[in-house]
Amino acid sequence: MASEGMRDPKHYQLGKTQFDPDLIKEVEALGGKNAQMCYQCGTCTASCPMGQRSGLRVRTVMRKANLGMRDVLDDPDLWLCTTCYTCSDRCPRRIMATDAIIALRNIATREKKVPMSMIKIMGAISKTGHGVPNNEANMKNRVKVGLPENPPTTHTYPEYIKDINKILEVTGLLKIREEMEAESQ
Amino acid sequence: MDEEKRIGVFICHCGTNIAGVIDVKELAEYAKTLPNVAHAQDYTYMCSTPGQAMIRDSIKEHNLNGTVVAACSPRLHEPTFRKATEEGGVNSFLFSMANIREQDTWVHMEEPEKAMEKAKDVVRMEVARASMLEPLTPKTVPVEKAALVIGAGIAGIQASLELADAGIKTYLVEKEPSIGGNMSRLDKTFPTLDCSQCILTPKMVDVERNPNIELMTYSEVEDVSGYIGNFDVTIRQKSRYVYEDKCNGCGKCQEVCPVSRPNEFDLGLMPRKAAYVPFPQAVPLKFTIDMDSCIKCDLCKGEEACGDLEAIDFDKPDELTTVKVGSIIVATGFDMYDVERKEEWGYKVFDNVVTGIEMERLISASGPTGGNIIRPSDGQKPKSVGFVLCAGSRDQDEEDGAKPYCSRVCCMYSLKHAHQLIEKIPGCVPYLFYMDIRSFGKAYEEFYYRIQNEGGKFIRGRVARITEDPITKNLTVTAEDTLLGTPVEMEVDLVVLANAVVPAESTQKLKTLLTLSNSPDGWLLEAHPKLNPMSTTTDGVFLAGMCQGPRDIPDVVAHAAAAAAAASIPIHKGSVTLEPIYAIVDQEHCGGCATCIGVCPYGATELNEVDSKLVASVNEAKCKGCGTCGSACPSGAIKMQHFTNEQIMSEIEAFAQGW
Amino acid sequence: MKEYNFFLGCIAPNRYPGIEASAVKTSRKFDIELRDFKGASCCPAPGAFGSMDVNAWLALGARNICLSEKEGKDIALICNGCYKSLFEANHRLKADPAMREKVNSILANIDYEFQGSVEVRHLIDILYNDVGPEKVKESVEVPLTGLNVAIHYGCHLLKPKFDRTFGSSERPRFFDELVEALGATSIDYKEKMMCCGAGGGVRSYKMDLALDIANEKLYNMTQAGADVIVDVCPFCHLQLDRGQVEIKEKFGDVYNLPVLHYNQLLGMAQGMNPEELGLDAHEISVEPLLAKIL
């Protein structure tokens, strides 16, 4: 019988931490070079501009990746990294911690744990070829400096957009976007 | 080969190292089918006592006149099996070894069938060679009863005292004007807090007084030739422009000299004159004129100074001396990592960031501040000091010149500095930013306990970067307190970078002269990292102290004593036996063309007139059997003993039979 | 006359066309022609897009490079983000056969193949290493004497140092030298090398936190007496220019610090007028800057 504030003994999970030894290998394979070699010195966290103003702790992310604690993929702070690469430049074990974070983001994306803001950027690229497409106000500004209304990119040559979508399709990204946009309805 | 060849082949299992990959019994059976093989068997451990007995007994039982052991690398047990062969009554150079472990089963363990084929090839080749071998007699040469120690820091000092006290004449060569090395720069030593100069200077004086030690300071080894027991070493005694026998160390020249330069001993933190001794307790206490800075004003030669003694001579040349020694010990120490290259820590950009060794000079009573620890920017006593541990050590960034190894001494000296700050500046708080505290030695962990007890603060996090307040010149140290999981930015008055120790630049030249190698980390390579750290693979050359790798003073002293013991062995024995693996000139066929003179890297070949014909001959002791002359000789007049053309060709032909 | 295919990215052509125009005009003065790059797309955004799938990121970047390979032209660009995408894709696919094979297998679906036959250059690299600060100085007609410039290098230009050509990212000097060649003064300020906060998809994900980083930089620049901010990345440019408007809305801090891309500052120094460089389209008015220069 559990009283208020006390955990029901039936639910105690001693010794049940889940470790997945393959996680770090997935991270290294996706570009997180040397990630397995982290010796937790903390140079990365100390170099991180986001670490100064949020709960993002690069070292802890690397710890969880190394031990294989997959709950790191659910961490909303994982998406706070601005990819400034300061940690990677200073790491004494030459670990690309930024790329390890990007790798974890890739794995999370496959599990549809990616923020909708990212999906929206993919949507813009899928539709127009640009992550930040042109608009009316800008077209006027373009003409003012002597440029055509649209740049000579996919905006002027939309026939190239289908190629872009083909790549999004074969890599499985389009599907992820479809499913996530459907779920968010 | 008049006598019929009867070779015994012994296949070693080496436990499962060999037998676990190939079928050793099948290999023994195969050996029996080879020409000239009179006996073949396999055994679990050939190097064991019964294994060696097996060789001895088989020679007698089967009337063998040659042996082949197929096992590990000859670098391990060639001497063992040669001896067993000799004890069986057969010349030890009629023994040959087939490496079927390092070069076969160890590297091909994933492909056992192919490993088996290769083992058969190797045994067949070695039997063919063994069939062509000739008996040889090792040569004994006398050993010069003298030793050379290069470098007179604590390692060189210790080694030379041990050798000298054992009755061996020792030449001690030091490139600086004084002996003492880096240890003389230190203030106190961990963990005892002994004053470094107080424990070192008695040894320095002993060196100067010891009748068996010939001390050559301000000198460098210029050339080395010869071989163990008989090294000819040319030493350049650089000119001090002062006659050492006339100088009495009075210092008047220094007083009148108008030229100031940064003192190298004080790492440039304090000036010295162009006429100087590096520090007051210098041994020998003889002045040196730094001719690069001297303006030849002649004041030092005047009446007020050295006029009477006439010890100064601006035209005094360098002196070259050649000495003959039996053993050489290298004790050339270390340099510090140029931590300026780690721009994130601001060394040489921010005034109040210093290195560990600079801190030693600031703490030292004979240093630039007389032992008052003050900040370079304003001379104020620091109230908080940040220590950056592992500054350039344990770091894979080769492009910055950082080193992957641990420098071993910095945790302990940072603890010591922390203690000294707490002691000398009441209220001063030292903050040590560390990844690990490596307090491994005797009384070291207790020292760590003591410093924490005295108020040293420890933050587990490597310093990511340091910034400076442009007005106060205080420093902000940024690290993550990994134990709290929080980034910290701490403002301190002074930062000490415990920077890495690196191999000394000056050792580079010696490597070529003494045919020494580096280990991958850049320090000198020892003969065996566990069982023989004080010798090298060059017979007669030994290593003492930091030149072989980072170590603290107790380990340096122990290592130096070990080097002295090892170096004294050939000297006390009085003779060394040389392997008869050298070149021989057939003077009848020699055309006197001198090609071999030009190609020999060891200067072992000579041209002499014999019966009014110029012919070459080889100094067997200098020859290392490298084979260069043997292959270069256009007349084919040079034979490489134990590796003759016929022997090598027989191996190649035996190999080809397998195709 | 050296010709490059001018890779535009997104933010420059679609939000700050002055950056695009000034690059073309100022480069002509050094005999460099930045030609129209037909059919190029988003690079794609390395932080935002690469976070979802690195292979798709490399493939889309390689698609852009392939377009230029077909014309046999090297690529020049004016954005740190695009530099990361295209320089790294080019570099990695040239050096790593396994990766090249993987990306080419994706590109095979659209009948493209990465050859590795062209170079990708950031215009600031071309100006420093090919043209040189001396020549840049010679092209100056209106020296920017007395102008305090807070330089923002950005991140992807320099880092990771192992995959770039500029050496250490702690205290670089080349951008400062190019600004000083115009007669201006490059001022030091706290956290000069810090990120602008926009990258990695963070500006869209958590704008407040992204802006907090920019806010710290803007504060430091103002404290150090900056008259203008100069960058080499349209995304940093957006973050620091439009970002000031957003910061005023959200946090109430006001800086009124004009933001220019280097090519716009170069154009001013070369005597071009602000309208043709698109300076009037900036969110933060450049009037105080013009008052100082003209």
Image (spheres, helix red, strand yellow):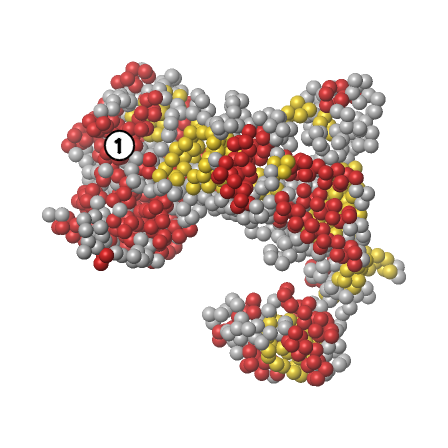
The one nearer the camera, B137 or B361, is B361
Q: Residue at x 56, y 67 (%)?
A: B103
Q: Amino acid at mark 1?
A: Leu
Closer to us: B187 or C201: B187
Residue depicted at 72% across the width and 51% down the height:
B564
Circle 1 residue? C211
Q: Give the left or right position of residue B658, taking residue C259 as reference.
A: right
**Location of residue B659 in the rendering, given as x and y in whole percent from the top left corner:** 55, 76
Q: Position of residue C218 (x, y in %)?
A: 31, 26
Horizontal side of B567 relative to C204 (left or right) equals right
Is residue B251 among what the camera can see? yes
Instruction: State the residue at coordinates (33%, 50%).
Output: A64
Side of B11 where A175 appears, left or right: left
- In which quadrant is the N terminus of chain A drawn? bottom left
| Residue B245 coordinates in the image, percent (x, y) | 82, 32
**Chain ID at mark 1:** C
Above or below residue C207? Residue B57 is below
**Number of marks drawn:** 1
